[in-house]
Image (cartoon, grey):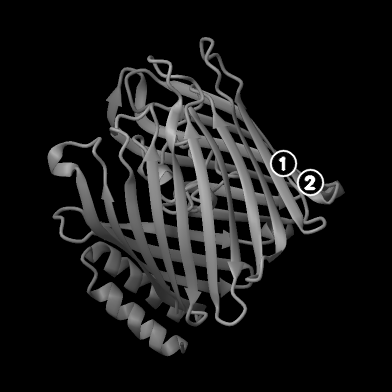
Amino acid sequence: MKKTFALLNFFYTAAFSPNWACGVTFLFFSALAGICRADVDTGLDIRGRAYNSSNPAYTTDEASRNFFDQRTRFYLKGDLKENINCEMTIQNTGLWGQENNDKLFFERTNIKAEEFFSLPASVILGKQGCKIGEGLLVNDENTGLSGIKIDSRLPLGFNASAAAFKLIETSSETFSGGERDNDVYFATLGRKIFGGEFAVAYFTDVNKTSSTATQQTLIDIRYESAVSGELKWSWEFAKSIGDKKGLDTSALIVRVKAFGNIAKLGKGNAFLVYAKGKEGFKPSTSHIAEYEETGEYYMKNRESGRSNSIENLQLMGAGAKARTKFIPVDIFFNYFDYGLAAADLAGKTKLGRETDYGLLYSYTDNLKFRFVYSIFSPGEAMIENGKKNEQILFETNLFF
């Protein structure tokens, strides 16, 4: 799409935004970019998901959950001058048919300076996506974290990152324990070794949102191999280095993926995944990354939501995906077994099993469709009367 038309669409979106402040901000930055004669790209992507599931664990009025959610994202990206880039994204999410459910927020508002002061480093300031490894420690790629992040290339082939983010800041509201905020700091050091990538991360989460301040510090070690003989694997281990009164605060995830021809369908891949988070592993920003290989139903509908989703969880899964030879359609099948890392008070550990069947169709490079049918069978550790739950997911992505 031509940039002129995209820019007109951008102005229209900003002007009629339900949140006038977001609209005014978009107009201001687009005008500023025009004055600076920046190379600006604007766009839009839309995602819709239709859910149809029944969960007897809920009360009568919530037993049947049928709804359609949507996400619309407007973005602006521009090169202000050499090695200086800006990014701004507004996201709107909500459920159709439910009042007071729409959310409109800034997903990205940042400026990136590459080769900062002629050094082999880049600096990103503002609200940005952030993830460490598989996402066991920090994974906020969707909503973004506010702060500063520095990426640099070091001698002897090393690379390093350092970041400081503030999740909550309400300085006017104070408790005896200090300001009402939540800060995250981390530093990573990595290097290519044996053809793969090895990295170590130091992570600190300081939470002062209650009257008693808490601090959680963890070390994360990760290795991801290169593709060798059509096989790639990775593992990540995280461990708290603070006093948790005897609780095991470790988490482990191992993933193996194979590439090649699958049956008569054509090129594809197959995977095996194992993850285990002990009962004490729950920093406030921690959750598994939203991979397809972790389950479409259970991992997105767990009681605690996305936050801390690997706490006291053992996951084993396998699946395969292949592209058909005659039309641009990917077919995939996944199977997962979920359990508690530490048994509940009744000594039960089985959470349930899930099977996902899906299709991915690329109509063009800009328009893609995704359909998934999931079946979840609760285990003995879940109060669901042994009944199955079904979910139908339909997703479209439109890019300009």
- Three-letter code for the amino acid on which mark 1 is drawn: Ala
Q: How packed is label 1: few (under 14 Cα within 10 Å), some, or many (20 or more)?
A: many
Instruction: Give x and y (percent) for residue 153.
Output: 75, 52
- Which is more N-terminal, label 2 or label 1? 2
Marks 1 and 2 in Cβ contact (< 8 Å): yes
- 337 on left or right of 63: right
Q: Which numbered dot is residue 165?
A: none
Visible residue check, residue 221? yes
Quarter-of-image position of residue 121: bottom right
- 100 on left or right of 360: left
> Which secondary structure lies at badge 2?
strand
- 140 on left or right of 385: right
> Which secondary structure lies at badge 1?
strand
The structure residue drawn at horizontal position 42% and vertical position 69%, both measured from the top left corner, is 75
Q: Nearer the viewer, residue 263 or 244?
A: 263
Visible residue check, residue 288? no
- Three-letter code for the amino acid on which mark 2 is drawn: Arg
Quarter-of-image position of residue 170: top left
Mark 2 = which residue? 191
Instruction: Give x and y (percent) for residue 231.
Output: 76, 54
Q: Is residue 68 above or below residue 11?
A: above
Q: CA distance from mark 1 to mark 2?
A: 7 Å
The structure residue drawn at horizontal position 77% and vertical position 56%, both measured from the top left corner, is 227
Instruction: Give x and y (percent) for residue 38.
Output: 51, 78
Q: Is residue 328 above or below residue 288?
A: below
Mark 1 = which residue? 199
The structure residue drawn at horizontal position 29% and vertical position 57%, both measured from the top left corner, is 51
